[in-house]
Image (tube, rainbow, N blue to C red):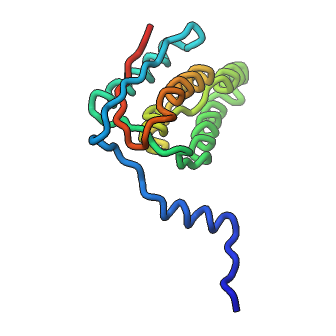
Amino acid sequence: MGKPKAGKLVRAAVKKAAAKPVVRNNDLPEVTIKVQRKPMHARAQFDRKMNALKKLSDEGKLFKQANPVARDESITKGYKARIRQKIFDKYWPHDKEMANRLSARLSLQQPDHVWELQLGGPDDVSNLKLLHGDTNRDVGQQIWQQIMKLPDGTPIRIEVMD
């Protein structure tokens, strides 16, 4: 008898388990990437995000992770669902207006990996904060455009441009 055929999910799991994790390679030169603040960014949230990345940069923790980044989308979906549930637990039914206002505001937010996955951050709920969706997408895209052609493990330094 021949070897049993492995399904797509099994092949993906074996490939993921066999993949060597990417780590910071200090033999590569450090690359400074610049993130531009834009009028569309929610300023306080942008500043919080960039201050966290700058601190990680100063601590020598940022590096280009392999793409595609391994992630479990149920972590971010569950995070947002728990926040929505907390809103309704606190305000429904005695203050339906507040519950609906906060829920509408939440719909503009995304769970953001404060330490970007593409810069070596963990895919863990402890690494999540809500961030304005447009700000989250734009910052991530700005970073990706500058690191996508770098070798995996390249040390990264962050600079914020006003």
Quadrant where the C terminus lies?
top left
Q: How many marks?
A: 0
Residue 121 visible in the snapshot: no
In the depicted structure, whether residue 110 falls above or below residue 36: below
Residue in the image at 31% along x and 33% along y: 29
Residue 128 visible in the snapshot: yes
Where residue 88 sits, quadrant-wise, is top right
Residue in the image at 55% along x and 63% along y: 15
Foreground pick, 49 / 32: 32
Quadrant where the N terminus lies?
bottom right
Where residue 85 appears, as percent x and y from the top left, is 64, 37
In the depicted structure, whether residue 117 falls above or below residue 43: below
Q: Is residue 125 left or right of residue 12?
A: left
Residue in the image at 55% along x and 67% along y: 14
Where residue 119 appears, as percent x and y from the top left, is 43, 36
Residue in the image at 56% along x and 14% along y: 41
Where residue 72 appears, as percent x and y from the top left, is 57, 49
In the depicted structure, whether residue 44 falls above or below residue 9: above
Where residue 11 appears, as percent x and y from the top left, is 62, 66
Foreground pick, 66 / 120: 66
Q: Is residue 55 left or right of residue 33?
A: left
Foreground pick, 55 / 48: 55
Most extreme residue toward the bottom is: 1
